[in-house]
Amino acid sequence: MDTLADHWPTTEAEARAVQERLRGRVVTHDDFGTLRRLAAVDAHFGGGDRVTWAAVAEVDPDTLELTRSVLLCAPTRFPYVPGLLSFREVPAMAAALALLPEPPDLVLVDGQGLAHPRRFGLACHLGVVTGLPTIGVAKSRLVGRYEEPGRERGASSPMFHRRELVGVALRTRDGTNPLFVSTGHRVSLATAVDLVLRVTRKWRLPEPIRLADALSRMHG
């Protein structure tokens, strides 16, 4: 049976062509049902970047308690190129999500969504190839200008790139640096911001992403 990685680009030119082809499939309005299974994905690299460790943390959306987790190791199939990070991480992330007994209702992705030079960051790419609703939650800005939001939790500021609204700088904890939230796939920006704030309770990062990050670092 073919897998996602069997037809994966191997050059920058091929990857950019894929981004151009797939970005038109991104859905930027809410297109999901009741949230019963909320997941987050993260990835780290090992073995001199030869392998990718992808982690999935699935939580109860109300209690944020961990309900399932997956840690998968796969060969890294693409070099590090700014703006093409998804081609390194998506194959392993998609494979890890596929190991869950049921698909999650929504996925938080540690990375950019539409806040990307070609409007096709990691969260968009993962959402389109899996069909799952996704939200990009990044710790640093890739593109876009914004005014610094207020210092209190919940303060936010719109982020624009080439005069287009691409995301929101969101303060998730008093006095900490903002996170950069953007639509991935099948989730509107307003809903993305509300949901990220809802599942970020004690720390700067949303609890599901915090769990996925910790899990992805558990390899030897």
Image (spheres, rainbow, N blue to C red):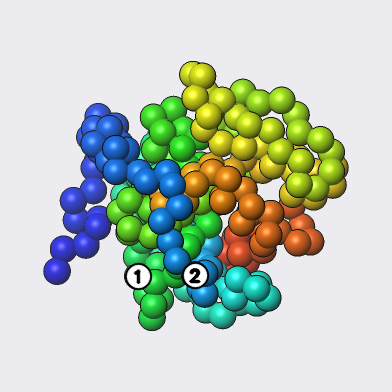
Q: Is residue 149 above or below residue 47?
A: above
Checking the image for residue 168, the label placed there is none
Asked if residue 164 shows in the view, the reply is yes
Residue 179: percent from the left, percent from the top? 67, 43
Q: Is residue 112 left or right of residue 79?
A: right
Residue 147: percent from the left, percent from the top? 71, 25
Residue 10: percent from the left, percent from the top? 24, 41
Please identify the quarter of the rendering in which residue 156 is found.
top right
Q: Is residue 1 above or below residue 196?
A: below
Residue 8: percent from the left, percent from the top? 23, 48
Label 2 sits on residue = 34
Q: Amino acid at mark 2?
A: Thr
SS under mark 1 = helix
Q: Is residue 132 left or right of residue 163?
A: left
The residue shown at (52%, 74%) is: 36
Circle 1 residues within 10 Å: few <14, some 14–19, many ≥20: some
Of mark 2 and mark 1, the one earlier in the sequence is 2
